[in-house]
Image (cartoon, helix red, strand yellow):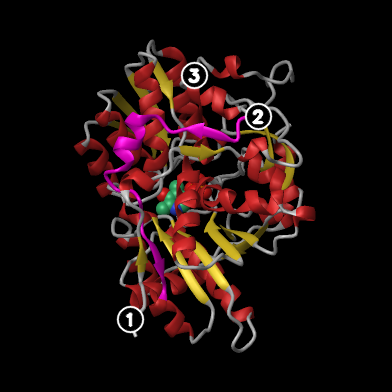
Amino acid sequence: MSQKKRYFLEEDEIPRNWYNIQADMPVKPMPPLNPQTREPMKAEDLYPIFARECCDQELNMTDRWIPIPDEVREMYKYYRSTPLVRAYGLEKALGTSAHIYFKNESVSPMGSHKLNSAIPQAYYCKKEGVKNVTTETGAGQWGASLSYAASLFGLEAAVYQVKISYEQKPYRRSIMQTFGAQVTPSPSMSTRAGKNILTANPNSQGSLGTAISEAVELARTTPDCKYALGSVLSHVTLHQTVIGLEAEKQMEMAGEYPDIVIACFGGGSNFGGISFPFMRHKIAAENGKSHTRFVAAEPASCPKLTKGKFCYDFGDEAGYTPLLPMFSLGHKFQPANIHAGGLRYHGAGVIVSQLLKDGLMEAVDIDQIESFEAGCLFARAEGIIPAPESCHAIAATIREVRKLKEGEEKVILFNLSGHGLVDMASYDKYLSGDLINYTVTDEEIEANLAKQQ
Ligand SMILES: *Cc1c(COP(=O)(O)O)cnc(C)c1O
């Protein structure tokens, strides 16, 4: 009997709208605050930093569906729909009767889901006459995606890359440069934020928080320049809902509906992207009657959802961003240098933070050795080497499978956020037994949160 392995949508079935869960949330997220006055901020207050359209989307609490511009949809067609894949190989390797599906976002030109938001962000900048975009990047996935998207719309891109990644991941830098971006290791002497950090600590290896500070400063001080962010903010997650909206139709083609939806968690964009379209049915169901569970998998070394505190905190280390209501480890938190660079961020998006608080989703933390074990098992079973970030989703999936009773047929859907072919140095470390686990104690987290006042 032939069993269907992959489900695709025709080009004209690619979603025409993104799903804005803010319109449906039982409790809306609290507003961002101006750090000086602690007054709620309006979309206009964010216009100097981000594309106007993105600012409006960020605080849009009323429109459930937000149209995907035709120009963006045209570029989505270069790689969408992405396949929904039934993981027969993984099911067999685990000896489970669960039905495991994954949405394969690794097939995008840049190898991860990040392009889904880079394209609209670059497009909105272009539309309002902006000439330059700037951003930060860790492992380089976001920087590569924005560099490519900028080149599509004839914009110049300036990327601050966390110094340790700039040195350890030279190929992502080459990818950005191939698309014409200017890449600077952060902290750098080119901004006040960078200079301050280097003066205090000349050996600083950088962090995402520092790189954000540098990029935001550049956007504020350069004419016709906007900043773009690859995760955390609500408009980024909005763009990523194209993942879940496609998956919803594809699961229908497979004649199934997920009992559990799982994704790895850095700032929440791929998690929200795959989850929110399914969560809308849970919210709409009477008394939240739908049984579907949503599980975010974060690294044990950066456990903002499982061990952080819900509070107003800055999105960056220097304190340039608005104050955001989120689960956070404190904006001064310096995560251990794990290989899943995309998950090393101190906070969680405001939507996800509110949903977690309201019990609509769950979170688990996973250490890096368990994540790579899961990644290698998946690679051998399905022939795709997952990004170190995505390995966390796979590990969480395996944990769920292990909890099932013999013969139980749960349907599990996880997001494969990216492939790991540019991250083989990390796999080398794992395979040679050189990886260690990092965990954070409650005392360390308390100390970090105390530092921020
Ligand atoms: C950036 C990244 C992540 C984490 O970001 P989210 O906003 O939490 O999705 C996960 N996987 C990959 C491959 C990434 O590049």
Eye-nearest disc, 3 or 2: 2
Specify the amino acid type for callout 3: Arg
Q: Does the rendering let one see residue 101? A: yes
Q: Nearer the viewer, residue 319 or 158?
A: 158
Does label 2 or label 1 sit earlier along the sequence?
A: 1
Q: CA distance from mark 3 to mark 2?
A: 17 Å
The quadrant in which residue 324 appears is top right
The structure residue drawn at horizontal position 33% and vertical position 81%, both measured from the top left corner, is 2
Labels in figure, total: 3
Q: Quadrant of the C terminus?
A: top right
Q: Which residues are magenta?
A: 63-87
Tag 1: residue type? Ser
Q: Secondary structure at mark 1?
A: loop
Residue that mark 3 sits on: 52
- The residue at which mark 2 appears reads as 62
Callout 2 amino acid = Thr
Disc 1 marks which residue?
2
What whole-number distance in Å separates the C-alpha atoms at marks 3 and 1? 50 Å
- Give neighbour class at mark 1: few <14, some 14-19, many 20+ (Cα, 10 Å): few
Q: Say whether disc 3 or disc 2 marks the residue closer to the N-terminus.
A: 3
Q: For marks 3 and 1, give the one nearer the viewer.
A: 1
* Residue found 44% across the figure and 29% down from its top: 228
